[in-house]
Amino acid sequence: MARIKRAQIRKTRKKNLFRRVRGFFVGRRRLRQAIEARMKAEKQEFIGRKQRKRQFRRLWTQRINAAARQHGLSYSRFIHGLKQSGIDINRKMLADLAVREPVAFSALVERARSAL
């Protein structure tokens, strides 16, 4: 009869798997369902990491647009004016300036307006 030497490893793997899927709609001790639930969760995590980047860029664009329109300039004209004047600030920093430093943002708007 063969001697099984992997029992502890298998128990540890199963325990870690069930700990990972705790709270999911999975049978309490159904290994196959737990594996499938973990695979689906990992797939959704991967998709979510990509979507988060898109959603933040959209949020930054909306904030910049709202702040630029308060100064009478559309988003596209504001960005074009910044590029014309040689100011190279990414959208994350622009959105942060628009929210936290409105005076500095208005100075950028004036520079962009003068370059148009």
Image (cartoon, rainbow, N blue to C red):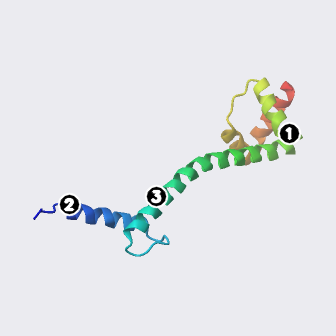
Residue 61, image x, y percentages:
74, 44
Residue 86 pos. (x, y %): 74, 23
- Of residues 31 and 41, the one nearer the viewer is 31
The residue singled out by tag 2 in the image is 6
Q: Which residue is mark 1?
A: 74
Specify whether 14 is left or right of 85. left
Tag 2's secondary structure? loop
**Rendering quarter of residue 19:** bottom left
Checking the image for residue 39, the label placed there is 3
Which mark sits nearer the N-terminus, 2 or 3? 2
Cα separation, mark 2 vs mark 3, equals 24 Å
Look at 41% across and 62% down and name the residue there: 35
Contact, CB < 8 Å: mark 2 with mark 3?
no
Task: State whether residue 20 is above or below residue 98.
Answer: below
Looking at the image, can residue 42 be seen?
yes
Amino acid type at image mark 2: Arg
| Crowding near the residue tagged with mark 3, few <14, some 14–19, many ≥20 C-alpha atoms within 10 Å | few
Does residue 64 lie above or below 16 as drawn?
above
- Residue 3 in which image quadrant: bottom left
Q: Quick check: marks 1 and 3 in contact, CB under 8 Å?
A: no
Instruction: Characterize the local packing of mark 2: few (<14), some (14-19) or many (20 or more) Cα atoms within 10 angstroms.
Output: few
Residue extending furthest toward the right: 72
